[in-house]
Image (cartoon, rainbow, N blue to C red):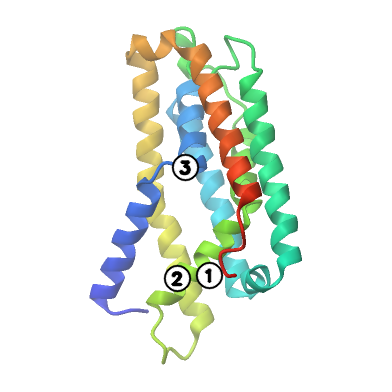
Amino acid sequence: MPDTPQLLMFIAAGWLLNLTPGPDVLYIVSNAFKSGVRAGIVAALGIVSGCFVHVFAAALGVSALLATSATAFTVLKWIGAAYLMWMGVKLLFAQGGGSSIVPADAARVHQPADLRRIYRRGFLTNVLNPKVALFFLAFVPQFIAPGTPDKVTAFLLLGLLFNLNSLPINFGYAWLAGWAAGRVSAVQRTMHWMDRAAGAMFVGFGLKLAMSDNPSR
């Protein structure tokens, strides 16, 4: 493991990265708006679970394959892009009311949600994004000392720490979104357009992923 200053830098960098809005944050916030804080927390757990898959894969060398194999990167890239755009299109064409990000009235914020489906979708959002794997491959090794005898274990421990440190940030997003949905009437009145905006953003993230090049090249 790195020394204390390096470890603190690793933690701080992880928090800053997790504070940056992206598909993960959008997914957590949208579910918290629609079904309450619990749904947002489940969405965050699904996303973090997907990150663990990439951490283990990176430690075992799968990310190295994605970094060196154009075919492997392209296949996973297109699967992930298609999934993001599919989610976006569903939101764009969702009917007003129960399918919207923000419920029509505050009482519906806590309506029962399909937590298994929310978890599964959060999980797949990260697992099907090859850039998550390449991120761990590029970011984590910077904090592993060259002379470390067991680099795989060090990688796994740092990956575990990164993912656990992301939970307070993600849970915070879920809590803030759930709180706002129940108390801010202006947010509730724009529920129909929130679906559309979120859908457009997901489609945009999918297109961006589809047009991206392998960053290792």
Q: How many labels does the image show?
A: 3
Q: In which quarter of the image is the N terminus?
A: bottom left
Of discs 3 and 2, which sits in the foreground? 3
Residue position marked by numbered label 3 in the rendering: 22
Residue 79, percent from left and from top: 73, 48
Q: Residue at x 54, y 20 (%)?
A: 195
Q: Which residue is drawn at 59% across and 13% down?
A: 98
Q: In which quarter of the image is the C terminus?
A: bottom right
Q: Residue 140 carries which label?
A: 2
Q: Is residue 101 visible?
A: no
- Secondary structure category for the residue under label 2: helix
Residue 31, percent from left and from top: 51, 28
Quadrant in the rendering for residue 216: bottom right
Measure how far apart labels 3 and 2 are at the Cα level: 20 Å
Answer whether labels 1 and 3 touch (C-beta < 8 Å): no
Residue position marked by numbered label 1 in the rendering: 137
- Secondary structure category for the residue under label 1: helix
Within-10-Å neighbours for mark 3: few <14, some 14–19, many 20+: few
